[in-house]
């Protein structure tokens, strides 16, 4: 039996006033979950005024059970700091996992059309939900 080569996983981190964005690229699994936790913790530590953390999942290729566990762990840590955790651009497979596990409600979620509108405006629209309160996207 031959071992499969590990798939690359990278995070692109951007931070601004009150907001951090982490772009997840590749596979979020047992081998890579620690990196997401480390980067999320670093953002929470380095930016005490953080109100929102966005995980951009558009380039996520896979999320196994450890990846789901990691998303929950990041949610616990952001909630403890009253930081809203957004899952932006979840691919269809991730939407299915969130629905099947019943955890979609834990994350701030905007339908892709709303995410596109926010991306194309210079100023993010103020949220109608207080930090830490989830919104729900369409049922898939």
Image: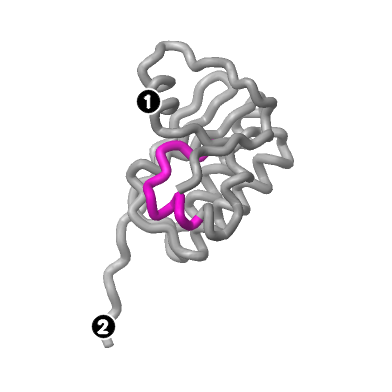
Which residues are the magenta region?
86-97
Q: Which residue is nearer to you in this view: 48 or 109?
A: 109
Q: Is residue 96 magenta?
A: yes
Q: Is residue 7 left or right of residue 44?
A: left
Name the element at disc 2: loop
**For numbered disc 1, what is the local secondary structure?**
helix
Could you tell which of marks 2 and 1 lies nearer the N-terminus?
2
Which is more toward the observer, 42 or 64?
64
Query: Height in image: 33 above or below 125?
Result: below
Q: Which one is in front, 6 or 125?
A: 125
Q: Nearer the viewer, mark 2 or mark 1?
A: 1
Q: Percent from the top left, x then y, of residue 22?
A: 45, 38
Outermost residue on the top side: it is 122
- Picture quadrant where residue 105 is located: top right
Q: Is residue 132 magenta?
A: no
Give the numbered dot on residue 2.
2
Q: Position of residue 114 (x, y in %)?
A: 44, 26
Q: Give the colouring mode of the picture.
A: one colour
- CA–CA distance in space, label 2 to label 1: 42 Å
Q: Is residue 101 left or right of residue 78?
A: left
**With respect to residue 90, does 49 lie above or below?**
above
Residue 78 at x, y = what percent?
A: 65, 40
**Count the marks: how many?**
2
Where does label 1 land, which residue? 116
Residue 106: percent from left, percent from top: 63, 45
**Residue lying at 63% horizontally and 27% vertically, measured from the top left:** 51
The residue positioned 27% from the left and 69% from the top of the image is 5
Residue 65, placed above or below residue 21: below
In terms of image quadrants, where is residue 6? bottom left
Quarter holding the N terminus is: bottom left
Query: Pointer 2: residues within 10 angstroms few (<14), some, or many (20+)?
Result: few
Q: Which mark is residue 21?
A: none
């Amino acid at each position: 039996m031959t071992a499969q080569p590990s798939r690359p996983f990278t995070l692109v981190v951007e931070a601004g006033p009150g907001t951090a964005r982490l772009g997840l690229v590749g596979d979020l699994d047992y081998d890579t979950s620690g990196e997401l936790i480390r980067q999320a913790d670093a953002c929470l530590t380095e930016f005490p005024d953080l109100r929102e953390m966005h995980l951009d999942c558009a380039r996520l290729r896979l999320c196994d059970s450890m990846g789901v566990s990691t998303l929950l762990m990041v949610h616990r840590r952001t909630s403890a700091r009253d930081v809203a955790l957004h899952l932006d651009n979840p691919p269809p497979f991730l939407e299915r996992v969130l629905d099947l596990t019943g955890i979609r409600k834990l994350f701030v979620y905007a339908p892709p059309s709303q995410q596109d509108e926010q991306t194309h405006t210079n100023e993010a629209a103020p949220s109608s939900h207080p930090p830490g309160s989830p919104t729900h996207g369409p049922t898939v």
